[in-house]
Amino acid sequence: MDHVIRAAIVYLFLLVLFRISGKRTLAEVTTFDFILLLIISEAAQQALLGQDYSFTAAAIVISTLVGLDMLLAWISTRSEKIQKLLDSVPLVIVEEGKPIKERMKKSGVDETEILQTARELQGIASLDQIKYAVLERSGGITVIPYSEQKSGRK
Amino acid sequence: VPKIEKVGSLQVEQDLAFQRLEWRFERIGKALIALFLLAAIAGVFGRGYLSRAQKSSPSGSLTVQHERFARRDAPTELEIDATGAPNAEIRIWLSRPAVQGLRIEQVTPEQVETQTSPERTTYVFRTDGSGHAHVRFDVEPRGPGKMVSQVGIDGGEQLAFWTFVYP
């Protein structure tokens, strides 16, 4: 019984902590983020299992974590509000070619990151080719370039 | 069905009101994390300045050093200074809540004898030439909550102290 409670508390704690730290934190996993992730899991493991190394305890803890995840995913599909609370909302950070500085600053995104995504995903060379950039729920950036054919503008 | 906003020709479920709330939540959350860490450094969660405590009996024949804040299953210490007759036996007892709430891992120096009764467990040690005995209990709290324990010298003074055990 106490393993279920422990796992639920650790799950909620991590959920709140990562919501506080902002969606950019683990969006792009750099080498150091990867190490950080490993250390966090190591620290959480102790709290989850204590001194109990049995298979049963591991099965209970893993089932609780996956179960909670499925439960929250299910609730998210029913309630838009809860989905926003859990997964945040997308945010337009470049609108009609204009970077919106205030939103970028508050979200911890700078122009170099937008350019990096633009290069990686679309082969875009410069900011003036970007029509829209969106900071997605996941923390990733998506970029929509000006298209020559459809809108007729360049 | 989520309402989908239009930003220019872009269809996106942006919600600026919610986004502002989220930024505020992040700011408050960051302040709380900072407070939490400062509290941890100060010893609110054990092992720090605010956690260390020392208590002496009126005549000073008994002194206890302990941690006010301890954590479940995490090692902590209880140090007892007792004064009695020189080069003789001294009997130090711990009340039942202390004995039940703590897993006593090690007693240094080792006791000569242990006696248990329903209310207390008595440990027998030998004092040195000046009548002092310094005893250290390495313990691990078993469960969370506030714990009030008593320690005393058999036939002498006693002290009560509390420990808060975090889960």
Image (tube, coloured by chain):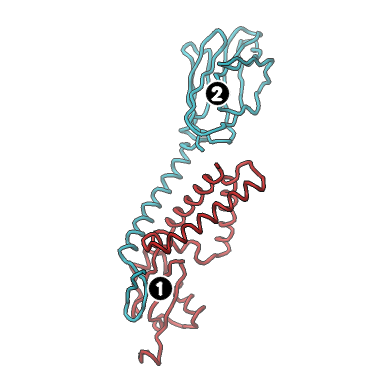
Chain colours: A red, B cyan
Quadrant in which the N terminus of chain A appears? top right
Q: Find disc 1 in the rendering and name its residue.
A: A134
Local packing at callout 2 (Cα closer than 10 Å; few below 14, some 14-19, many 20+) is many
Name the amino acid, label 2: Ala
**Residue A52, above or below B99:** below
Residue at left 49%, top 28%?
B163
Name the amino acid, label 1: Val
Q: Residue A38 vs residue B163: left or right?
A: right
Residue at left 55%, top 35%?
B72
Please, which residue is most extreme toward the left here?
Answer: B17
Residue at left 36%, top 89%?
A151
Residue at left 48%, top 61%?
A25
**Residue A4, above or below A105:** above
Of residues B41 and A75, the one nearer the viewer is A75
The kind of secondary structure element at disc 1 is: strand
Q: Where is residue A137 in the image (x, y as percent from the top left)?
A: 43, 66
**Residue A61, above or below A87:** above
Q: Position of residue A149 (x, y in %)?
A: 40, 92
What is the C-alpha distance between the residues marked 1 and 2?
59 Å
Q: Where is residue A38 in the image (x, y as percent from the top left)?
A: 59, 56
Which mark is drawn over residue A104? none
Labels 1 and 2 share a subunit: no
Q: Find disc 2 in the rendering and name its residue.
A: B98
- Residues at discs 1 and 2 in contact (Cβ within 8 Å): no
Of residues A111 and B92, the one nearer the viewer is B92
